[in-house]
Each structure stands twice: as structure tokens, then as C-alpha cells.
Image: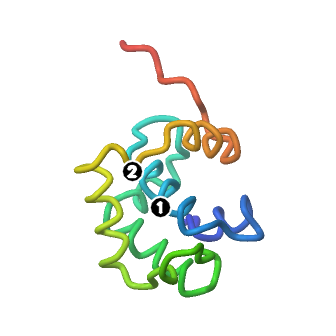
Amino acid sequence: MQNLASYLMQKFPEGVSDTDARQLCWWLYSRSYGLPQIYQPQLTMDGLADTFAGLASAGWVHAGVGPAPKSDRDHWHEVIFYMFTDPHLIDGARWTELDLLMGFEREKPAAS
């Protein structure tokens, strides 16, 4: 199985800010189209929590002005949960930028 963390590290070799990591985690969790099938098993809440905890632990997630990024999976579970409960946390413009940077399919498939 291809490793999502390795793919993200290739796409963003310098790492990302804590804010971008949160947006990226949510973006990956909420996408239902356009992502390579090889990564689908890792796009669960647990899979993404493990992936982003590992990336934070490796120093790929850079702290901003707030507290240091969390390297435990519970933190990333909370990131996904709170973005569901508070849509103000979602930055639609940044999602569009991340979408372009990731290079995945941007069009929703036509309904059959």
C-alpha cells in the first residue's frame, strides 16, 4: 500500500503550517472524489489521525503562533470533529489552493 504521509511529504517537502495541516486533514477526510484509490484506505478518521500525528511527530507540521502541533492521534480526531461542528474553521479559499497543489482531480464525476 502506498503511504499517504510519504505522498504528502513529496508534495510539500518543506512541510506545512499547523493551520494548513488542519485544513489539509479535513480536506482529505471530506473528499469523496478525485483521490487516488490507493489512498482510500488511509482516508478514514483513524487513518488520517495516524498519518497527521506521524507527520507532526516528524516535524513536517510547523507550529505557528499557537501551541506546538500535536503528535497524538486524539488531537487529529478533534481537528476533524471540530471542523464538522464549526464550519467557520474551514477556509474555502485555502481548500482551493490545496486542491491545486495536491494535483488531484478537481471535477466531481457526473451523476450516473
Which x, y percent locates residue 92?
50, 37
Counting residues from the start of the chain, the first of labels 1 and 2 encountered is: 1
Q: Residue at x 68, y 39 (%)?
A: 100
Secondary structure, mark 2, is: helix
Crowdedness of circle 1 by 10 Å Cα count: few (<14), some, many (20+)? many
Q: Up-down: is 11 above or below 60?
A: above
Q: How is the image coloured?
A: rainbow
Residue linked to disc 2:
89
Q: In the orientation shown, which residue stands out farthest toward the front? A: 65
The foreground one among 110 and 1 is 110
Secondary structure, mark 1, is: helix
The picture quadrant where one finds residue 96 is: top right
Which x, y percent locates residue 75?
34, 76
- Quadrant containing the C terminus is top left
**Circles 1 and 2 in contact, beta carbons < 8 Å:** yes
Q: Up-down: is 30 above or below 8?
A: above
The picture quadrant where one finds residue 110 is: top left
**Would residue 96 appear left or right of 88 to someone viewing this image?**
right
State the mark number for residue 22. 1
| Residue kind at label 1, given as amino acid type | Arg
| Residue kind at label 2, given as amino acid type | Leu
Q: Up-down: is 105 above or below 103?
A: above
